[in-house]
Image (cartoon, grey):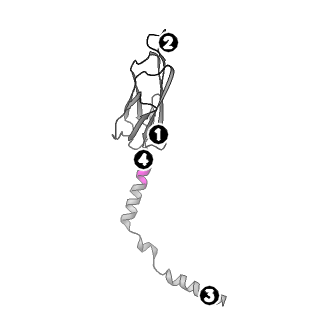
Amino acid sequence: MKKLVFTLSLMMVFISCKENATSKIKSDNVAVAAERDEAAKLVPVMSFDKSEHDFGTIEQNAAQQTVFKFTNTGNGPLIITDAKSSCGCTIPEYPKNTPIAPGDSGELLVKFNGTGQNQVTKTITVKANTVKGSELLRIKAFVNPKGAVPLGPTAK
C-alpha cells in the first residue's frame, strides 16, 4: 500500500511539472528588476567638515550662528528630509527636499539664541536618505548671565 501511494505521488509530481518555467518569465519584469537593483547600489554619503562647533564664551541671549558644510561623497543623490534640534533655542536651516548630486556640497545653518547658563550643549539630528539614516551635530557654548563677570573660557 505504501508503495502504491508513493508511486502515485511521484506520478503526480512529474505530471504537474510538464510546463517549462522559463516560458513564464516576462522580459519586461526582468529589465525593471535590473534597473531597480542598479538604483539600489547608488547610495549617498553625507560627509561634514565638522560635527561640532564651539561658540566659546558668550553673553546670555546673545544670538549666535554657525554653518556646517557637507559634501555628498557617495554615488547617489542626497536628500535631507529633516533636521531637528534638541530644544527650541536652536534652529537648523537646510536645503529642503533638494537633491544634492554626488560630489556636490551644501550647507546647514544653525542658529542658537544664547539661552541657558554655564556650559550648554545642543544637538542637531539631520535625517537623510543615507545608509545611516541620520547624522548628529553639536553646538556648545559657555553662557554667562547678562551683566555677570565672565567666568568661562575665553571666546574662540
Q: Nearer the viewer, residue 15 or 4?
A: 4
Q: Which residue is mark 1?
A: 134
Q: Secondary structure at mark 4?
A: loop
Q: Are marks 1 and 3 in contact (CB under 8 Å)?
A: no
- Mostly what secondary structure, the magenta segment? helix
Q: Nearer the viewer, mark 1 or mark 4?
A: 1
Q: Nearer the viewer, mark 3 or mark 2?
A: 2
Q: Is residue 51 left or right of residue 31?
A: right
Q: Position of residue 55 (x, y in %)?
A: 45, 19
Among numbered discs 3 and 2, the one appearing first in the sequence: 3
32 vs 88: above or below: below
152 vs 49: above or below: above
How would you rate the neighbour count of disc 3 (Cα within 10 Å): few for under 14, some for 14-19, many for 20 or more? Answer: few
Cα separation between marks 1 and 3: 59 Å
Q: Position of residue 127 (x, y in %)?
A: 43, 40
Q: Which residue is mark 2?
A: 154
Among numbered discs 3 and 4, the one appearing first in the sequence: 3
Among numbered discs 1 and 4, the one appearing first in the sequence: 4
The kind of residue on which mark 4 rests is: Leu
